Image: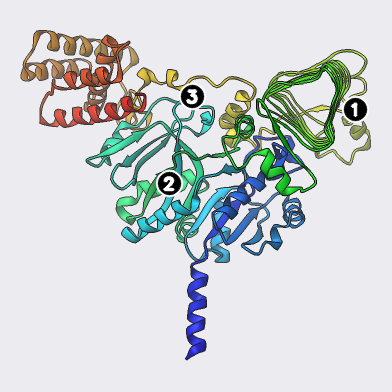
Amino acid sequence: MAPKQKNARDELKQEDILQAVLLADSFNYRFSPITEEVPRVLLPLVNIPLIEYSLEFLAAAGIEEIFVFCSSHFNQIDDYLRDAGWYKKSSLTVTVVILKGCYSLGDAMRDIDNRALIRNDFVLLFGDTVANLKLTDIVQIHKKTREANKLAVMTLIMKTAKPGHPARSPDDDFVISVDSSTQRVRHYQKVNNTTTISTTAISKKRPKVSNIHYNLLDCQIAVCSQFVPQMFTDDFDYQTRDDLIKGILVNEEITGNSIHIHIAEESYAVRVSNLHMYDTVSRDILQRWCYPLVPDILIPAKNKDNFVSYGRYNTYQCSAVTLERGCKLIQNVLVGKGTTIESGSVITDSVIGNNCKIGKNVQINGAYLWDNIIVGDNCSINSSILCSSVVLLNNVIVKEGSILSWNVKVGDLKSIIIGPSIRLMSRPLSSDFADDEVQNEEMLKSDPVYGSESKAFKYEDDEEENDSDDEEEKLTHDIWGTKIPNLCKDIDTCSSVNSLSDDHMSDFDEPPLDDFKMFYTELRDTLLRAEEENIRPDNLILEINSLKHSYNIAIKELNQAVMRLTIEMPLTSLSNASANQILAAIKIVSSLSLNERSSSFFNVCVNTMSITVSMFI
């Protein structure tokens, strides 16, 4: 009997193993043309490959089994993990899972389900994640939630980040409604390129007490049940995590499945999802916001021969650095091992890789130079990325938002200006005519605008490959090297609720814009007069109904217009008031309840605005 008991214990131990799925593919082209040759997870972030931050985060959380899922450049990822010693770790098992032709997270999850790799709850994240939060505690919270509700399939990890926060990427903004007692997600809506929020969907599923957030950052880390991969298999329309979230929320009354969130305070967790975030996270690491993931700890841990000294104003110098007299490291600067910086050069808010040579009187501001780069005299580099083995001859100016990919060479005897927002490669992209020798010779001639001695070709996006993500990719390209605007100013009346949702307007005949403007103006005047003259609610109902019929306005549009005016009226008269004064004014206006049904509707308005105002207190 003893052997059977031992086997039972072994099986129980196997079931208790905490697993993680790390997606090494990003499924987009935001770092092109860099990722034409090297996967994003192997790109250096403050001189450490991106995947190291994710693996260290999982290892510190006690994850015992990690599946690294990759499709493109899988040989490079496999070689790196082997050379870095991750396959030899005694505390955890790292396994590379390869699927050629994988184009989305949905494809990856369906393959994982087909292989039956997941046996219990697991952590799902991308390989470009940088985090120091206490994942073990969050996993335990997820398990307790599952004990109370067996159909809780996912816990999303989020952080508080108000609009305008540097870590908030415009293409990842969303509004979420959460049950305040259980943290169960009731509504989730992306707000990319729009400020219109579906108030109907929010109010329909709204419990008695809930929070509506526009002040959260999705860390793109989720603790999932073992049934999540199967959900992707059951519905081939699920291609992204957002598709899964939307599907679960739409069908929650049928399936009973639910999603919860955990707001991690006083921790750092973001994805390097685009070039803007690459810049933001690099600065955060240099400024020690994600301790202990800082250069003077992480770099020596990966290379014992590379000592890093930490100086004033967040300046870091690795081993064998040569700084000539007169050069200056202003603030937030890392200089890699074996790098030489000549006199008169000034560097600020930048990362310099290993074995680089920086000439005289060079200005580098907000730029990222990787390994083995040569920069000639009198060059200027601003808010750009220079990949390994790039050569800039004398008098080259690289403007904001530019990318010089691997082995690019720019310059000649005259001054050369690159950018802004130019992307260069050392060779043209392969084409159907690659075998044509005559055309090949023409293609390999570098553009003379980059210098007679240059080896540089302008990178152009492939419109066919990127057609499905054109708007999103264009957004992330445009913001690199530019200041992110205060998003709060772009939201009408700084509210998380705006006027009319296009999705819900489609159910009715939309009135002409001019007629609706006239109706809206008269409705506002009517409500103001009702407050000033203390008009009885019954009489006010008659007036509003007459307006409704006069302009042929649907009841849903009427309710939305009244709700918006409920929010706008106190804000108009209290533009410089405190949040508490605004909230009090809203409650006064909402006291003009039209009937029992409208009163309930007003209460939704008041509670929604209360939450919105509280976010900015």
Identify the disc placed on residue 374.
Answer: none
Specify the quadrant that holds the C terminus. top left
Q: In this rendering, which labeled residue sits more in front, label 1 or label 2?
A: 2
Circle 3: residue type: Gly
* Mark 3, other Cα within 10 Å: few <14 / some 14–19 / many ≥20: some
Residue in front for this viewpoint, 479 or 428 = 479
Image quadrant assignment for residue 345: top right
Q: What element carries label 1?
A: loop
Circle 1: residue type: Lys
Residue 370 appears in the rendering: no
Q: In this rendering, which labeled residue sits more in front, label 3 or label 2?
A: 3
Q: What element carries label 2?
A: helix
x, y percentage for residue 32?
A: 70, 35
- Mark 1 and mark 2 lie on one chain; the one further toward the N terminus is 2
Residue 64 drawn above or below residue 11: above
Q: Is residue 367 left or right of residue 127?
A: right
Circle 2: residue type: Ile
Identify the disc placed on residue 445.
Answer: 1
Identify the disc placed on residue 164.
Answer: 3
* Pointer 2 residue: 245
x, y percentage for residue 568?
A: 28, 16
Q: In this view, does 223 lie to the left or right of 196?
A: right
Residue 563 drawn above or below residue 270: above
Q: In this view, does 4 lie to the left or right of 66?
A: left
- Mark 3 and mark 1 lie on one chain; the one further toward the N terminus is 3
